[in-house]
Structure formats: structure tokens, C-alpha cells
């Protein structure tokens, strides 16, 4: 046999052997069950031959070990203990086992074959992966570091009994940098480290700074109005306090239109209001939020006396007893609103005070817009009530009982007179007010 033939035979045999080896490997890669290759470990735990679920079960040992850890956090010499078990920190078992299953099974056939041979000889360590539930983590950090964190404080306006204005300075808040701490904890747990972690605190700026309040130039009482109510009517008094509290401290920028309904919101049991007397169809009945109209009325008069612009106002269907006729402002959520505009070029500030049977609303602004305001209202028309008789078989024949006292109806008008430094600036008409007569109802025996 010639040398050429012998060489060809050797090449053919070698190719046959290589093809068989590759075929076996290809068959293994394509058809072998999805199990972790021998030699794959995770922090010393052998994962060889395990499938996904088996591998995750195996890693529970490591997770239990990690979750028993208590991390030490430090800040300016103080130490804080953070139990991993209760801080939303877990081992990412699924991703770790998925990486273990992929070991030696990625890339071209040659790359897979080479990787498999390397794993068999050298082994392959899957890196530990940590996942953290950010909400649970945040709650844990806030609970153990409450002594070093503080909320930012907005600058505010303080009014004393003499209507003197004081600015309460703002203050920066301090909060643990949870983003950085989150990364640090993942890093040390994935490396198996137990070193102490230094906390980093971030400054939290207040929403309203001292300088912003100063720039508002609120320095004068523009107008004030007070009404009285029966403090023994507990439900109505309570509703007045609730509604007034929503207006207290309100800062209104220049040219802003204020909606009473938007500020105060719905008036029902779900928002904390109680049933008290409300006027519906010319009658006083029990309904949710009774008393809120006294707050809108008091605000209306305070706005009038401050020289501000009235945008929308409606009167009650019958006169009320806590303001002169023509000076009330009724409101019904999602139906009837009271609106006014800050027509000054500076901020205004609303202060409400509810004491024993008295509601006071003050409006502060810039002294350049202080005006002397007087209000006059009068009745222009009067309408008599009708007398309605209704038969009642429960009464003796001819017997009469008055079931509803009647009341006259009125048409009222008014003006607002505004002086600037004792010089008449303007006189303007107020919205007209029409109050319906209330029929006198008499039951008579049949």
C-alpha cells in the first residue's frame, strides 16, 4: 500500500472519530435532559445533575443561611441592626439555577463543547444573586433609623391674636440614601461579606422655603368677618369646624380663582361630615354636611371686605339668621359653588378660627391692597306666603293645627363701596338675592 493511500486512510479514520465525538456531543446538547452539568456549584453547594425545581430546593439551604444574617449599619458612631429575615431580602434562586442550567450550553457547538470540558476539569461557580422587595426594605430602614431621619419643614405663616404676622422658617429634611444602601447590601451579601455598612444621609429640600414665603410679601390684614352658631348643636358645630379647617392656611397666588367646593371637597359621611340642618326646597331638614354653608357665607363676607373679586355666588332659597339679608352664599357640592379671584398682584393667606360658637375668617395680603370697604344691602320686593289647608282625619271636625309657619319672600340687592386712603375707588353692585316665600300650612279636621 502506497504512503498516499495510508495517509488517506488515517485522515478518514480520524475524521470518523471526530464526527462520532461531535455527534455524541450534539446529541447530548440537543436531546439530553435539562439538568445541571457536573462540576457546577454555588458558594460550595454542589448542583450537579439537578433540574430547575431540584436546584431551587437545594439553594434553600443557602437562602436560610443568608436570611439568618443581621446586618450592621452605622452612622456617626451609632449602630443599627437590620435583620435580613424581615427586610424583604431574598436569594434570587430561580435566576441562579437558570444560570447553572445554562452553564456549558451557550454559544456554538464548539464553544459549548469547550465550556463543558472546562467545567469537568475546573468546575464552575455560579455567583450568588440577591433580590430585595423595595417596599418592605424601605419600611425596615425607616423603622430602625427614625432617630436620625427627619421630615423637611415648610416655611409657614403664623398669626397671633393681634393679627401680627410671623414667618416660621423652613428646615431641610434628612433621609437615609436607600438607593445607595440597597446597592451596598446586595454587594456584600452576594460576596458573602459581613462588614459594617456606613449609612449615607441625603438632604430633602422643603416644598416651600423661607425665601419663597418672604417673596409673597404678606404683611397686612385685608379683611375679616365672623358669624356665630349654636355650639350646643354638636353635629352642625362639628361640620363647621371640619369645613373651616380645610381653608385654614390656604395660600392663594395672584390672579388665582378659588373654588370653595374644590378646596372643601365632598360633604358626606365618607369624608367625615355628620347630618345636621340643611335647607332643601325652602325647608330645613337633616342632611349631610349641615353647617358648611355658614363657612362659605362667612368666607364670602370676608372676601367682600377684603376688596377681592367675586366670580360666582348664590343665595339660599330662604334667608339665614347668621348674616344680614343678601349676604349669604350657599354651596352644594358638584352643583352650586362659591368662587372668588385673588385680583391683587401678591399672594393672599386665609386664616380660620373656630372658637366656642364663633367662626372667624381672616384674609391677609400685601398692605398696598388694603382697602376700607363697606357693604349695604336692602330689600326691594316682598312677597306674601300662601296659606295651604290640608284635611286631616285624625283631627276633630273643624279643629285646626298649624303644621308649618309661613315666611315672606324677598328680593334683596346690595352694593360694595371701596375706599383707598379715604378716596372713593369704586362702588359696585352685589349679586341680587331672591328668597322664596314659605307657605303657611294648616291641617284641618275633616
Image: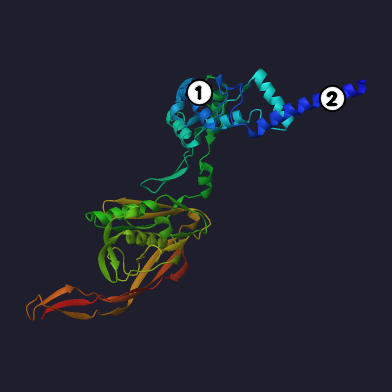
* Up-down relation of residue 71 to residue 258 (above or below): above
* Up-down relation of residue 267 to residue 115 (above or below): below
Q: Residue 11's mark?
A: 2
How far apart, in angstroms, are the residues tagged by discs 2 and 1?
Answer: 51 Å
State the image quarter where residue 435 is shown.
bottom left
Provide the residue designation for mark 1: 62
| Foreground residue among 398 and 169 | 398
Category of crowding for the residue at label 1, using alpha-carbon neighbours closer than 10 angstroms: few (below 14), some (14–19), many (at least 20)? some
**Display colour scheme:** rainbow
Q: Are discs 2 and 1 less than 8 Å apart at CB? A: no
State the image quarter where residue 313 is shown.
bottom left
Dot 1 falls on a residue whose secondary structure is helix
Q: Position of residue 394 (x, y in %)?
A: 10, 75
In the image, what residue occupies the spot 37% across and 47% down? 162
Q: Is residue 175 left or right of residue 299?
A: right
| Foreground residue among 327 and 82 | 82
| Foreground residue among 379 and 100 | 100
Instruction: Classify the position of the N terminus by image quarter.
Output: top right
Q: Residue furthest front?
A: 1
* Up-down relation of residue 237 to residue 96 (above or below): below
Q: Is residue 422 visible?
A: no
Which numbered disc, 2 or 1, marks the residue that appears first in the sequence? 2
Category of crowding for the residue at label 2, using alpha-carbon neighbours closer than 10 angstroms: few (below 14), some (14–19), many (at least 20)? few
Q: Position of residue 170 (x, y in %)?
A: 49, 39
Q: Position of residue 359 (x, y in %)?
A: 32, 55
Q: Is residue 267 left or right of residue 52?
A: left
Dot 2 falls on a residue whose secondary structure is helix
Q: Is residue 321 left or right of residue 330?
A: left
Instruction: Classify the position of the C terminus by image quarter.
Output: bottom left
Q: Residue 372's mark?
A: none
Amino acid at each position: 500500500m502506497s504512503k498516499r493511500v495510508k495517509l488517506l486512510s488515517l485522515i478518514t479514520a480520524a475524521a470518523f472519530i471526530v464526527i462520532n465525538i461531535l455527534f455524541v456531543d450534539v446529541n447530548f446538547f440537543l436531546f439530553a435532559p435539562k439538568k445541571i452539568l457536573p462540576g457546577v456549584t454555588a458558594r460550595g453547594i454542589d448542583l450537579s445533575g439537578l433540574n430547575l425545581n431540584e436546584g431551587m430546593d437545594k439553594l434553600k439551604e443557602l437562602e436560610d443561611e443568608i436570611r439568618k444574617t443581621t446586618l450592621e449599619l452605622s452612622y456617626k458612631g451609632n449602630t443599627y441592626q437590620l435583620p435580613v429575615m424581615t427586610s424583604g431580602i431574598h436569594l434570587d434562586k430561580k435566576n441562579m439555577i437558570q444560570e447553572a442550567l445554562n452553564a456549558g450550553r451557550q454559544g456554538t457547538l464548539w464553544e459549548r463543547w469547550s465550556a463543558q470540558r472546562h467545567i469537568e476539569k475546573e468546575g464552575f461557580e455560579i455567583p450568588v444573586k440577591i433580590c430585595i422587595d423595595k417596599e418592605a426594605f424601605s419600611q425596615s430602614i425607616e423603622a430602625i433609623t427614625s432617630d436620625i431621619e427627619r421630615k423637611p419643614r415648610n416655611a409657614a405663616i403664623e398669626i397671633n391674636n393681634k393679627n401680627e404676622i410671623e414667618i416660621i422658617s423652613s428646615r431641610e429634611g434628612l433621609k437615609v440614601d436607600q438607593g445607595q444602601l440597597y446597592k451596598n447590601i446586595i454587594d456584600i451579601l452576594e460576596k458573602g461579606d459581613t462588614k459594617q455598612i456606613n449609612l449615607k444621609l441625603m438632604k430633602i429640600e422643603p416644598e416651600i422655603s423661607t425665601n419663597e414665603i418672604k417673596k409673597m410679601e404678606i404683611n397686612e390684614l385685608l379683611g375679616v368677618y365672623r358669624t356665630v352658631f349654636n355650639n350646643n348643636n354638636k353635629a352642625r358645630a362639628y361640620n363647621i369646624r371640619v369645613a373651616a379647617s380645610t381653608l385654614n392656611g390656604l395660600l392663594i397666588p395672584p390672579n388665582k380663582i378659588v373654588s370653595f367646593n374644590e378646596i372643601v371637597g365632598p360633604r358626606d359621611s365618607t369624608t367625615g361630615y355628620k347630618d345636621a340642618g340643611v335647607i332643601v326646597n325652602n325647608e330645613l331638614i337633616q342632611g349631610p354636611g349641615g353647617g358648611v354653608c355658614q363657612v362659605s357665607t362667612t368666607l364670602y363676607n370676608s372676601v367682600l371686605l377684603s376688596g377681592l373679586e367675586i366670580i360666582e355666588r348664590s343665595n339660599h332659597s330662604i334667608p339665614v339668621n347668621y348674616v344680614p339679608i343678601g349676604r349669604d352664599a350657599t354651596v352644594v357640592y358638584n352643583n352650586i359653588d362659591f368662587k372668588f379671584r385673588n385680583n391683587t398682584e401678591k399672594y393672599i393667606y386665609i386664616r380660620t378660627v373656630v372658637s366656642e360658637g364663633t367662626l372667624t375668617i381672616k384674609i391677609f395680603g400685601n398692605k398696598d391692597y388694603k382697602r376700607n370697604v363697606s357693604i349695604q344691602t336692602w330689600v326691594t320686593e316682598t312677597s306674601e306666603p300662601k296659606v295651604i289647608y290640608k284635611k286631616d282625619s285624625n283631627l276633630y271636625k273643624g279643629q285646626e293645627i298649624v303644621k308649618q309657619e309661613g315666611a315672606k319672600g324677598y328680593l334683596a340687592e346690595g352694593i360694595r363701596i371701596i375706599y383707598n386712603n379715604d378716596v372713593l375707588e369704586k362702588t359696585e353692585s352685589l349679586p341680587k338675592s331672591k328668597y322664596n316665600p314659605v307657605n303657611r300650612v294648616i291641617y284641618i279636621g275633616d
